Amino acid sequence: MTKFENEVAAVHKQLQQVFDPTPLQFNQYLSDRFGARIYLKREDLSPVRSYKIRGAYAFIIEVIERDPGQKLFVCASAGNHAQGFAHACRHFRKKGVIFMPVTTPQQKIMKTTSFGVPHVEIRLVGDSFDEANKAALEFCKQEGGLMVPPFDDAKVIRGQATVAKEILDQLPTGVAIDRIVLPVGGGGLASGVTHYMEDRLGREGGKAPEFSFVEPDRAPSLLESLKAGKRVSLKDMDTFVDGAAVARIGRNCFNRLKKYNAKQVVLAPTNGLCGTMIEMLNVEGIVLEPAGALTIDALKRLPRNQVAAKTIVCVTSGGNFDFERLPEVKERAMKFDGLKKYFILRFPQRPGALKDFLFLLGPEDDIARFEYLKKSARNFGSVLIGIETTRPDNFDRLKKKLDQAGMRYQDITDNEIVANLVV
């Protein structure tokens, strides 16, 4: 075995003392839908519902073996890394301090605390991750703590690479993978999996699968870095897909991934991703967080010839979904599918105006929001209306009727600035 394979095998042996390998499941529904053989590597079924537990354990295991006297470990995270870190600190009975932004939802704080009690302390500092991270680094200097990074560290990468070892060990006899689809945030998982796959399959005389890397379309740190040939810091980033929204891919990670082509990166539109989350929940009963659904969503975006009749493994990286976000996820999905729109209409200030408008609606149209915004003139007023329907072409029919009726309107569905102010 190569040096990296041996290192990963050693980490995996340690991890097996803590939790069983996550399952590699053949998914009939996705296979039928895409005319392929689709397997899901269910990292959403780990003890903390995320693959992040692997990297946190790998880091702490190696440190303890080298320096058993290290008593204090520190991390900055408001997500899956914090939960994996807390789980590891509790297992090894080591003091852990987690720095989170003050804005972190209480549900995440409580869940992280439950994994680490009584060995982990959570400190809320600042309004952003950067502020919490800065406080964590300063605390390490003052108290002699050791920072456990979320992705950009060789020890963490080795931990994430155990995903690849399990995939190859779990594959049915005689099955060869054509493509592995990997989510990318900071790059630790993608770095570890690609490295292990190429080392092991190359040594065994086989061919490494093709790799596809999936990022949120509003946080494409790997794509932009591959295009530039160097690490790029994103200036404007949407954090909805919080498990993969990283402004700058890790240095160690990019050194590993820079040999790949930018064409291998798939961008998942946020609202489309929400549709995939709803689909997997309704059809398969699988709860995925936004980042956890990236690889399944990519099946819709990949060229047909890269999917049809192929054997594909999608890594579902996490399932820490707060169901309080479900209404927003459903709305985003409907907007992406063209089944929900918001309009601002100029309504005549006269009796019967509302009734006239209602008669313009079709039998499949439903008013989900109706609000007078402001009486803008003596004879007219502005109204915000949200409409849901069952087929996208119903909106073409409605707009045509509005035009024929001489009613002035503006579709603000995709106007983020206006929609954020009034919806």
Image (spheres, rainbow, N blue to C red):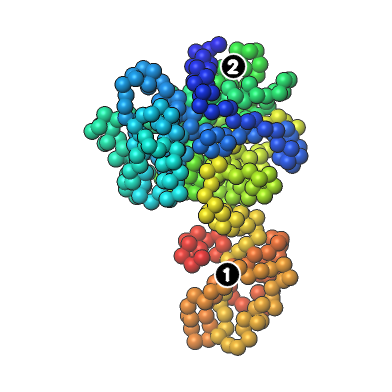
Residue at 69% x, 76% y: name it: 360
Disc 1: CA contacts within 10 A as few (<14), some (14-19) or many (>=20):
some
Residue at 41% x, 32% y: name it: 90
If you read the primary sequence from the N terminus, does the residue marked by circle 1 or circle 2 appear first? 2
Most distant residue in the front direction: 118
Where disc 1 sits, the SS reads strand
Q: Which residue is mark 1?
A: 369
Image position of 126 with respect to 24: above or below: below
Question: Which amino acid type corresponds to the residue marked 2 in the rendered image?
Answer: Arg
Q: Position of residue 265 (x, y in %)?
A: 57, 36
Work out whether residue 314 can be spotted: yes
Residue at 56% x, 17% y: name it: 199
Work out whether residue 184 can be spotted: no
Q: Is residue 58 left or right of residue 348?
A: left
Q: Is residue 19 left or right of residue 156?
A: right
Nearer the observer, 188 or 300: 188
Image quarter of residue 280: top right
Nearer the observer, 69 or 178: 69
| Quadrant where the N terminus is found in the figure | top right
Q: Position of residue 102 (x, y in %)?
A: 35, 49
Nearer the observer, 248 or 165: 165
Q: Position of residue 395 (x, y in %)?
A: 67, 65
**For the residues bearing labels 1 and 2, Cβ distance under 8 angstroms:** no
Most distant residue in the left direction: 142
Q: Is residue 163 left or right of residue 38?
A: left
Where disc 2 sits, the SS reads helix
Question: Which amino acid type corresponds to the residue marked 1 in the rendered image?
Answer: Arg
Residue at 37% x, 21% y: name it: 64
Q: Position of residue 171 (x, y in %)?
A: 67, 24
Q: How far is mark 1 from mark 2, CA to CA? A: 56 Å
Q: Which residue is mark 2?
A: 200
